Amino acid sequence: MEIRDELLKLGKEKAKKDETGEMLSAVVKQKLGIVSEQEMPFTQLRASGVFGLCPRRAVFSMILPMPPPVVTKNNMSMQLRMDTGTFLHEYFQDFVLGPAGVLFGNWKRSYTDKDGVLLDEKERMCFMPPPTPHPESVGWCGRWKFEEHHIVNDELHLSGHHDGWIDKQRMKEYLAEIPFTSEEPVDLVLLEIKSTDDNGLRKMKDAGGGPGLLEDYKTQATIYQRSVGVTETLFFYIDRKYFSMFTFTYKGEDKYWDYTKEKSEMIFGSVDAKKLPPKHVECSFKKSKRAKECPFIEFCFCEDADSVWDIMETKED
């Protein structure tokens, strides 16, 4: 009994020592796991999401009052995946592809003093320039940071940002360990960095790259290619678990560009004509998963849904 009592005592003491660690875990989960999402009007269609966008939801967002933010808890893993993806983008742009001299795009350098006051700021469309320290600056020490290229198509109400351009000629020269022959871009393809889990990467490899791309990504790449005048996108997949990589090129397809134009015309034409567009194919009944996640579900499925225009006119008055 004495040995058992001693073991129980040690177990209790160990549990007490772990309270601090448990509190830290709780703080992290509370900070990362509570996410507030606010619905915003779809006055601009995002290239990354236009393929799967419900036209009716987009119209509702422009003519109805915005619903209150949706707060979700215990969402830490999703937030961490998103933050890891953002970090990997910046890491490969600023610390790998940029310094390798193969990433072309908009580079920005900011100098601040010890109090955070901006001393100087410059932007250049080029390959990554060498660090240029400022005598009064602290922090970045003159390192240039990549700014993703913003695109806007006013005619189609489209916007988005791509991950830069990769110069194929410079990649060859870098791998051959010879000096770059041109400071100007020679043979550019668009870069699209995607982070995924190990299972997602395996599926992409099994599909041989392009054929396994989600149609959302095919649409996104096609929009970017048409917008900047190139014919290929170099997809760079990175696995968040084991950091395995898989790369392949994809040439945009006319059908995705045509689909985007038709959807944009449907959405903004519906607003002008004051007539609701059809529901998304996955929202054919109210209890469908997608419908239940929509903040405008009650308006969408009510019998007199088209009376929503009366609400809009009241709002404008």
Image (cartoon, helix red, strand yellow):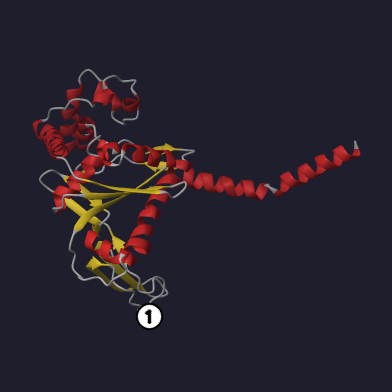
Residue nearest the observer in this picture, 228 or 77: 228
Which residue type carries mark 1?
A: Glu
**Label 1, on which residue?**
136
Res. 42 in view = no
Residue 109: give x, y in percent of width and height. Answer: 30, 69
Q: In the rendered view, would you say 143 is above or below 29?
A: below
Q: Bin the neighbour count of mark 1 within 10 Å (Cα to Cα): few under 14, some 14-19, many 20 and up.
A: few
Say which residue appears at 72% left-offset and 44% top-offset: 15
Q: Quadrant of residue 275?
A: top left
Q: Which image quadrant: the C terminus?
A: top left
Q: Residue at x 23, y 57 (%)?
A: 149
Q: Nearer the viewer, residue 274 or 216?
A: 216
Relative to residue 70, is residue 167 drawn left or right?
left
Residue 212 higher or lower than 238, as above or below: above
Q: Quadrant of residue 297?
A: top left
Q: Is residue 72 visible?
A: yes
Task: Name the residue: 21% across, 71% down.
Answer: 181
- Front residue of 315/281: it is 281
Answer left or right for 235 relative to 275.
right
Q: Nearer the viewer, residue 142 or 30?
A: 142
Residue at the extreme front of the image, as rendered: 176
User: Element type at marker 1?
Assistant: loop
Residue that protrudes farthest toward the top in the picture: 303
Residue farthest along the bottom direction in this orientation: 135
Residue 95 image point, x, y percent: 37, 63
Left or right: 229 as drawn, with respect to 198 = left
